[in-house]
Amino acid sequence: MIIVNTGDGKGKTTASIGQIIRSLGHGNKVCLIQLFKGKYFYGEQNILTELEGLEFFSFASEHPYCIEGITLEEAKEKCIPAAQKLAELAASEKRYDLIVLEEFNIALRDGFLDKIKFIDLVKKLSEKSDIVITGRAAPQELIDIADLVTEMKEIKHPFQKGISAKKGIEF
Amino acid sequence: MIIVNTGDGKGKTTASIGQIIRSLGHGNKVCLIQLFKGKYFYGEQNILTELEGLEFFSFASEHPYCIEGITLEEAKEKCIPAAQKLAELAASEKRYDLIVLEEFNIALRDGFLDKIKFIDLVKKLSEKSDIVITGRAAPQELIDIADLVTEMKEIKHPFQKGISAKKGIEF
């Protein structure tokens, strides 16, 4: 099953973490690959890294829109190992029940990953694993091949009032 | 901060679990009170019950719309201890960083909880804790007092094709 969490609201990443916890709780094998999670130390990392059954990879921690001093070209280069990891998973005999691709929609939106190649890899991976892909602005081509798509729609957010990210809530 | 996860799409409960994991990962104290979670064994329960810093209560496991043989009146009665627990938390000296009220929007929608009393308790609790309330059909009075509201909007769901809930994904 291919699952997409998109939209401009809060809950895309936390829902994927919840999905990981749910799956691990059934004794499943899970692989989490995250992008662009370098701005804060996210509390969940302390817990996730301790849980049995989860393999955790992080690439391209900085995104130019969040962290100064990195160019789009540099961010794109740092996404190459993420694409390689995906290709490796698709080619491997190893099977995960669930693969979570955190913020990959952003990498697709910004042209850091080749959309056609990515979609082919996701389709291939989905033959043996459930796949969750998160990030705002999911491309239509991904929505078209997905089985389950949720738009996390922002109805109200403290950011609208200029309040900054709160520890334990946004990270 | 008062946070509401509502809407007809997937991700309300998983996002609240992710929020719990994030908060616990920062060493916070968290209280989870859930309603209507008796239809399946949810994988996350195996993990959540093992985590330090989390207190976990479950009331009114059956909802008449999901499980046969229980009346609306019986479900309403089973929600009384949940309301009592909330009042107890509001009156207590004890402080949690985060309180998660799973599916309470459903109890409000169905008249199992008194809306005015509930909103007063949430306001009071929010003076010392962040509160997450989940469930479709959040009442407008709750949205009005919330700081952060996300609508999980169903764009695509296998249920639409008559495919039933999948272990590790929906429970």
Image: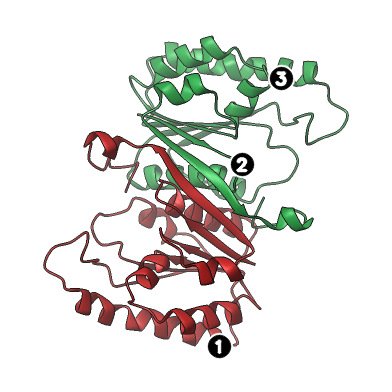
Chain colours: A green, B red
Q: Name the residue under label 1.
A: B92
The percent position of residue A164, horizontal first and vertical second, equals 77, 54
Q: Residue at x 36, y 31 (%)?
A: A97
**Which chain is home to disc 2?**
A
Left or right of B72: which side holds B42? right
Q: Is residue B89 above or below residue B99?
A: below
Amino acid type of the residue that numbered disc 2 sits on in the rendered structure: Asp
Q: Is mark 3 on a helix, strand or loop?
A: helix
The percent position of residue A11, horizontal first and vertical second, equals 55, 48
Q: Are marks 1 and 3 in contact (CB under 8 Å)?
A: no
- In this rendering, the label closer to the viewer, 2 or 1: 2
Q: Name the residue under label 3.
A: A78
Where residue B143 sits, quadrant-wise, is bottom right
* Pointers 2 and 3 within a single chain: yes
Q: What element carries label 1?
A: loop
Report the front residue among A148 and B23: A148
**Which chain is home to disc 1?**
B
> Split into 4 quadrants, where in the image is the N terminus of chain B?
bottom right
Q: Residue at x 55, y 28 (%)?
A: A138
Amino acid type of the residue that numbered disc 1 sits on in the rendered structure: Ser
Q: Can residue A8 be seen in this view?
A: yes
Which mark, by number, is residue A8? 2
Amino acid type of the residue that numbered disc 3 sits on in the rendered structure: Lys
Q: Residue at x 58, y 27 (%)?
A: A104
Q: Residue at x 27, y 68 (%)?
A: B61
Where residue B148 sits, quadrant-wise, is bottom right
Q: How crowded is mark 2: few (under 14 residues within 10 Å), some or many (20 or more)?
A: some
Q: Is residue A91 above or below residue B151?
A: above
Report the front residue among A71 and A93: A71
